[in-house]
Amino acid sequence: MTSKEGSLDAPTRHPIAWQDPDFTDPAKLDAEMRRVFDVCHGCRRCFNLCDSFPRLFDLVDASPDEVHGVKSEDFGQVTEACTLCDMCFMTKCPYVPPHPFQLDFPHLMLRHRVAEAKKGKTDFTARQLARMDRNGRMAVPLAPLVNWGGKKSNRLTRGAMDGIAHIDRDAELPKFSSQTFMRADKKTPGTVNASAPAYGKRKAAIFATCFVNYNKPETGLAARAVLNHLGVETRATYPGCCGMPFLEQAEMEKVAGQARKVAAELVKLIDEGYDIIAATASCGLMLKFEWALIVPDDANVKRVAEHVFDIDEYVVDIAKKEGLPDGMKPLPEGVTVHLACHARAQNMGPKAAEMLRLIPETPVDVIERCSGHGGTFGVVKPTHAVAVKVGRPVFRTAAQQARGHIVSDCPLAAQHIVSNVSQAMEKDGKTAPVKEPEHPIEIMARAYGLLEDQR
């Protein structure tokens, strides 16, 4: 096989061989990391994506013998800073498959985490935070108390959480809802708009995702309201978490278990003619791509991947094929759209911005850069400061744009941005125009005058 400098071919991904003994073999893993790091050192195109690459290049530059002289125990610094955003693989690296170098940096970082977890080197707090269904079921009945304890202004509880659980006292924590999305959907069923162009042509099952179900059912209700208004029959579904939080903690058995369990339930809806709609970018990425790399032989997983749409992607598709009903009102205050990394990694284009530009006379600004947040990365003490550092260019841009809404398909990214923009503007003696983060579909619901009914 001949080598070539870079590649313009579409990137392809190989299944993750997490069950192969070679996957965590220390010598083979170390050799592969050095091979990949040597290529990265010679290229350095990814230096501004996240903190993994500056850390790697600092190690190499401080070594008397480049990559060969870097200590293996220092590789953990590089792995720690990776949020598995996939942006290096999707947008920067010229050496991804099918190039002969076969670089997949995020999955190499995942492989290193799996090997470290096998040695017992895991973060207890991060692993507990990843148990989204358990945590959500426990927190929802106690939501007012849990939210009180999680407030940044609560010096007593946040100080204890910082010292004992290593949850950074300066991190904005997601609030829990007193009612799940699934319960809210059942309590107040939606009504399909029979006069809409798409009426009778589509059925959509809204996969709630753990965040929408337990933390922000408003997003799911907005998605349902918009789809119903566009003439789409909907059904809410939530067989369980997609497993992305487990993936971040390298708990591969749990990810595979969730994939098989959730896919088996979603296939039943596909058999009834429903499209599967993901309300959160990370979950859409899991259902479309990651599941199939982790359990490649599961037929249900393959079928789900063929029938999943991101919510913004789905609305844009309806607009193009069936058309939208009239009645959208301008939002002259405008919207700043953060294109979430896991939305970009779905290789579908900037659907959030494309959807919101359907709203008449509404300024839409786009930020196409990582917010710095990812799962527990922006919450736990070892990496919160890094999340803020990586996100600063985003915060500055959003503050300068000063639009009336800040949205992202990643709810944690949106919260991270809004919180840090507010802090930065307060230091300058200004008041931030945005107080609460939103999902793009909530803006569509607002433009159609549907949002108020969902509160």
Image: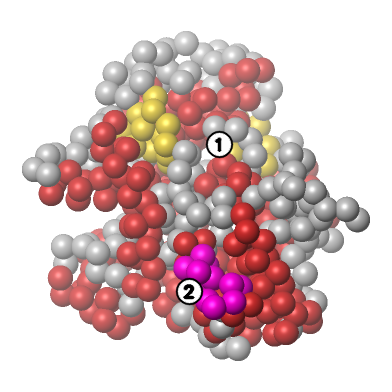
> As drawn, which residue projects farthest toward the right?
1
Query: Does the segment drawn in magenta span residue 392?
Result: no
In the picture, measured across the screen, residue 278 lies left or right of residue 367, that is right
Does residue 403 appear to the left or right of 447 in the view shown?
Answer: left
Count of numbered labels shown in the rendering: 2
Residue 399, image x, y percentages: 26, 38
Residue 284 seen by the camera: no
Please provide percent x and percent y for residue 50: 47, 56
Q: Which of 198 and 82 is in front in this view?
A: 82
Q: Main secondary structure of the magenta part?
A: helix
Q: Give the range drawn in magenta.
A: 56-67
Quarter of the C terminus within the rendering: top left
> Looking at the image, can residue 340 be seen?
yes
Q: Distance between the residues labelled 1 and 2?
A: 46 Å
| Image point (79%, 82%), residue name | 21
Q: How far across and down, in percent of the image, does residue 410 sit?
A: 46, 47
Give the structural element (helix, strand or loop) at label 1: helix
Work out whether 367 lies above or below 39. above
Q: Name the residue under label 1.
A: 311
Q: Name the residue under label 2.
A: 62
Is 62 colored magenta in this rendering?
yes
Amino acid type shown at disc 1: Ile
Q: Residues within 10 Å of mark 1 (few under 14, many from 20)?
A: many
Question: In front: 451, or 70?
Answer: 70
- Quick one: which residue is furthest to the bottom in this view? 119
Q: Which badge, 1 or 2, is on the more N-terminal residue?
A: 2
Q: Report the residue at 43% width, 65% height from top.
A: 376
Res 291 → quadrant: bottom right
Q: Tag 2: residue type?
A: Ala
Pick out the residue farthest to the left: 429
**Above or below, 451 relative to 59:** above
